[in-house]
Image: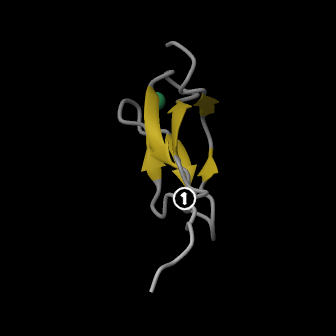
Amino acid sequence: MKRDHVPVPAPSSRFLRVECSECNEVQVVYSHASTHVTCNSCGNALATPTGSTAQIHGTPVDPSASA
Ligand SMILES: [Zn+2]
């Protein structure tokens, strides 16, 4: 049995680069993180889990932009 072309499913979740509002440390945070994500440097909360997309507390950094 042959199937027609099946498009590659595109996930709505992705990894975000978030800059800590306290110490400006940039950390990678999963957009649908199910656990609290804290800054590695100062322990500031970066993401809080919700029902779906995690709430991001820092400043999202565009990954395509040069650091
Ligand atoms: Zn920090």
**Is 5 positioned to the left or the right of 1 in the image?**
right
66, 49: nearer the viewer: 66
Q: Secondary structure at mark 1?
A: loop
| Count of numbered badges drawn on the protein | 1
| Disc 1: residue Cβ within 8 A of ligand 1's nearest atom | no
Give how far across and how far down residue 55 sits, in percent.
64, 52
Residue located 49% across and 58% down the image? 33
Residue located 47% across and 44% down the image? 29
Figure check: 3 above or below 48: below
Give how far across and how far down residue 12 sits, in percent.
61, 57
Give how far across and how far down residue 58 sits, in percent.
60, 35
Figure check: 33 above or below 45: below
Figure check: 31 above or below 2: above
Three-letter residue code for mark 1:
His
47, 22: nearer the viewer: 47
Quadrant placement of the N terminus: bottom left
Graded by Cα atoms within 10 Å as few (under 14), some (14 to 19) or many (20 or more), the crowding at tag 1 reads many
Give how far across and how far down residue 17 sits, in percent.
51, 33
